[in-house]
Image (spheres, rainbow, N blue to C red):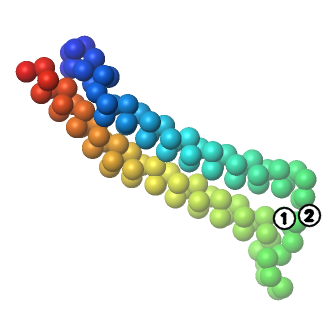
Amino acid sequence: MSSMIYERMRVNPKFHELVQKRGRFAWTLATIVLVLFYGFFMLVAFNPGLLGQKIAEGSMWPIGYTIELALFIFFWLTTVVYVRRANGEFDDLTQELIKDAQKEGK
């Protein structure tokens, strides 16, 4: 694509919408992941005894393993959510931008 097409894309309001939506979504997910991740390590640092307690009477699973497993699954699901939205809504907006920029150039 030529630099004129890129310029037309940059001034298109849909481009700014795409950048804002993608940025907000990425920062929201990143904030959630980092709060949970560092929250878990704060728990490890300041209350390690809690993590060694069993989740139920007679259970073999300590609370720490359960939390870590839940975090691992949550982080995996967060990645799936981001990829699906990036390959869906964000790609659709990008394709609209490209079509609009190419139409304006003709």
Residue 38 visible in the picture: yes
Farthest residue, direction front: 13
Q: Position of residue 92 (x, y in %)?
A: 27, 44
Farthest residue, direction top: 3
| Quadrant in which the C terminus is drawn | top left
In the displayed structure, 20 sits above or below 85; it is above
Describe residue 91's horizontal placement relative to residue 102 as left or right.
right
Q: Residue shown at 41%/33% (left/top)?
A: 19
- The amino acid type found where label 2 is placed reads Gly
Q: Which mark is residue 51?
A: 1
Q: Nearer the viewer, residue 96 or 58?
A: 96
| Quadrant in which the N terminus is drawn | top left
Q: Residue shown at 63%/50% (left/top)?
A: 32
In the displayed structure, 100 sits above or below 59; it is above
Q: Residue shown at 59%/61% (left/top)?
A: 73
Q: Residue shown at 90%/58% (left/top)?
A: 47
Farthest residue, direction bottom: 58
Q: Position of residue 8 (x, y in %)?
A: 24, 20
- The amino acid type found where label 1 is placed reads Leu
The residue labelled by disc 2 is 49
Query: Is the Cβ of the residue at disc 1 closer than 8 Å to that at disc 2?
Result: yes
Q: Nearer the viewer, residue 91 or 71?
A: 91
Describe residue 17's horizontal placement relative to residue 72 as left or right.
left
- Label 1 neighbourhood size at 10 Å, few (<14), some (14-19), many (20+)? some
Quadrant position of residue 2: top left
Q: How many marks?
A: 2
Describe the element under mark 2 as helix, strand or loop: helix
